[in-house]
């Protein structure tokens, strides 16, 4: 774990660790070690994420915020409305986790405009993929025209999840921007040692009254259950996974919300 501050106990407050998450370590990937990551891990830091997203085309009326704890007193301070949740977590039962979801479900086919796979080439891109899943599945128009983000959205609109994965892999402009922001933050930059990166980013959104988890390492969008509040619904799901021993208590949670 790479952090910018000490962990706090759950569930009243959550770890304020600016982890640099990925998927490859918790998958125990058989891919040969790379001299340098294609997509270095991002620090789980709302300022880093906001700056990155603004640079690629997120409208300034939206921002990434931070959840400091699960108590209602803490949640009351968060900017509203919240459109999506991004969680950096450490999976302790990966096989169960990646078996979730379906790309052929009614939800995936009819209610999720954007879902993409994550490949080994996109080694530590889970942070930006979680943002793409949150932003591109919002009913709000969040993207400025003629930007890296808008071009990616338009070019991948009719693609399959696998094709979208390939499109991101080969998008040199996006990749260059990603590497720039992977160097930012307060924790130590990790550029090649996968063993130092233990966490993984996922996104939660609400579509058609359902809480949906979006994670390119799963089988497809994972419908968690009925929900009208993406923040509290996501917290309830995270608390359940903590209680079931599926994830560790070293986690961080961010919000996609209106800018203040």
Image (tube, grey):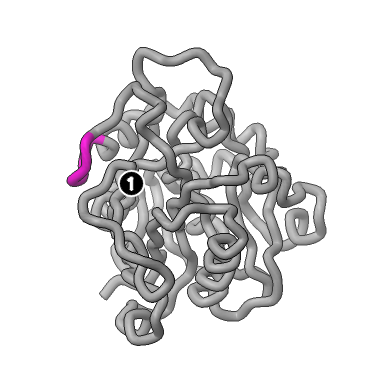
Residue 187 among magenta residues: yes
Q: Nearer the viewer, residue 180 or 74?
A: 74
Which residue is at a point 40% across and 42% down the rendered structure image? Answer: 21
Quarter of the image with the C terminus is: bottom left
Which residue is at a point 33% across and 60% down the rendered structure image? Answer: 15
Which residue is at a point 29% across and 50% down the rendered structure image? Answer: 18
**Mark 1, residue position:** 19
Give the x, y percent position of residue 76.
35, 85
Q: Count neighbours of disc 1 (C-alpha within 10 A) and say few if under 14, some if 14 to 19, many if 20 or more.
A: many
Report the number of numbered marks: 1
Give the x, y percent position of residue 197.
39, 35
- Examine the rendered structure and indicate whether residue 198 appears above or below residue 204: above
| Left or right: 22, with 93 as reference point | left
Q: Nearer the viewer, residue 2 or 175?
A: 2
Which residue is at a point 35% across and 23% down the rendered structure image? Answer: 193
Mark 1 falls on what kind of element?
loop
Quarter of the image with the N terminus is: top left
Residue at the farthest left position: 186
Give the x, y percent position of residue 129.
49, 44
Give the x, y percent position of residue 201.
47, 48
Instruction: Report the span colored magenta.
Output: 183-188
Q: Find residue 116 and report its image quarter.
A: top right
Main secondary-structure element of the magenta-colored stretch? loop
Residue 38 among magenta residues: no
């Amino acid at each position: 774990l790479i952090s910018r501050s000490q962990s706090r106990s759950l569930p009243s407050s959550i770890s304020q660790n600016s982890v640099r998450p990925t998927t490859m370590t918790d998958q125990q990937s058989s891919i040969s070690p790379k001299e340098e990551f294609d997509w270095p891990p991002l620090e789980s830091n709302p300022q880093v994420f906001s700056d990155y997203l603004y640079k690629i085309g997120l409208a300034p009326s939206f921002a990434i915020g931070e959840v400091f704890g699960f108590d209602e007193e803490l949640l009351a301070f968060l900017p509203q409305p919240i459109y999506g949740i991004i969680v950096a977590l450490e999976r302790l039962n990966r096989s169960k986790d990646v078996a979730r979801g379906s790309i052929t479900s009614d939800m995936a086919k009819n209610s999720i405009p954007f879902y993409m796979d994550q490949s080994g080439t996109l080694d530590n891109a889970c942070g930006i993929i979680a943002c793409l899943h949150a932003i591109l599945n919002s009913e709000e128009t969040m993207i400025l025209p003629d930007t890296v983000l808008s071009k990616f959205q338009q070019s991948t609109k009719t693609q399959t999840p696998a094709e979208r994965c390939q499109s991101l892999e080969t998008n040199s402009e996006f990749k260059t921007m990603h590497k720039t922001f992977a160097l930012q933050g307060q924790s130590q930059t990790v550029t090649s040692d996968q063993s130092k990166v233990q966490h993984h980013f996922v996104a939660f959104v609400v579509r058609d009254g359902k809480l949906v988890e979006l994670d390119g390492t799963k089988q497809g969008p994972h419908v968690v259950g009925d929900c009208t509040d993406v923040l509290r619904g996501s917290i309830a799901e995270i608390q359940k996974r903590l209680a079931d021993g599926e994830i560790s208590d070293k986690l961080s949670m961010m919000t996609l919300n209106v800018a203040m």
